[in-house]
Amino acid sequence: MRFIDPRTDFAFKKIFGSSGHEDVLRSFLNAMLYQGRNEIQELTLQDPYNLPRLKGLKDSYLDVRIKQKDGRWILIEMQVVNVPWLEKRILYNAAKHCSNQLVRGDDYDVLAPVLLLTLTDFIMFKDWPKIISRYSLFERDLMVEYPGNDVQLAFVELPKFTKTHDKATKLWEKWLCFVKEAGSLQMIPASLAQVPQIQEAFDIANYAALSSEEAEVLDNKALWWNDQRRLHKLYERQQQSYEQVKTERDQANEALYHTAITLQQSGFDDARICQTMKISKQQLQQILATHIKK
């Protein structure tokens, strides 16, 4: 048995954004946002999974959009690669969805709260140990929530979650095991199958149940994301190499500067300093000028 990897955007939307499988999405959201409490009871999928429409959107970010019975919105996005300015893009998307609810002539009281849930396949907040985190607007000193706090952000950082399915006990842990492990499993673990909605999610993710068109699109998308991961890792290595070279250069320039200053304080003129250090007068001026700018 083979399962599609929920961490690719097409697969994620098929599993959690398919009409007729709202129980899967409801269980997942209650686990991620409300520690398993049945806070979300009724929801409506907006733009549900539809392969012909998705096929032409190969490079787009495909989220799952939900409108609850009370009008509140939840947006979900699966993010595989840590692209530049991701934090700003996430905030922009949430704020844009909030503002797009208004049409000309509407009063602001028609705005419904928006929560954007982002799952990342990388560590986004290195200094923050929490796996699931939520952000809202608060007064800095008293930590009082801003009135009408209608835009909230939630994050699930998958690499911070290290439990395997045989160790998971809580509902949110079992759902994260499904998201992280499904693509590499050949059978449904009994510990996860105990949750009916996760069993249903595995049924949706069963590769054998895909149409030939779905299989082609999902396979191509998986290859595309693997390429993006490799390119991003290459970029990170290049950045690390650049930072290392820059640090070594700065250390060498610092040493040259201190040598030149020591010689000056010993009474050496510029010509003798250049002769001693085996550098030109222009290089000496650059060494001294660069340190002054710093």
Image (tube, rainbow, N blue to C red):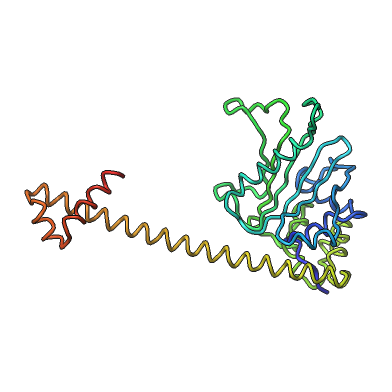
The image shows a total of numbered marks equal to: 0
Query: Looking at the image, which residue is at 78% across and 32% down?
Result: 102
Give residue 67's position: percent from left, percent from top: 84, 42
Q: Quadrant of residue 83?
A: bottom right
Query: Looking at the image, which residue is at 85% across and 36% down?
Result: 71
Indicate the quadrant containing the N terminus: top left, top right, bottom left or bottom right: bottom right
Q: Out of 49 and 58, give the one closest to the viewer.
A: 58
Give residue 81's position: percent from left, percent from top: 63, 58
Residue at the outermost right position: 20
Residue at the outermost left position: 267
Q: Quadrant of residue 108?
A: top right
Give residue 73's position: percent from left, percent from top: 80, 40
Give residue 204's position: percent from left, percent from top: 87, 63
Whether residue 102 is situated above or below residue 172 in the rendered picture:
above
Indicate the quadrant containing the C terminus: top left, top right, bottom left or bottom right: top left
Q: Out of 169 and 225, give the one closest to the viewer.
A: 225
Q: Quadrant of residue 186?
A: bottom right
Q: Is residue 246 left or right of residue 215?
A: left
Query: Looking at the image, which residue is at 52% across and 61% down?
Result: 236
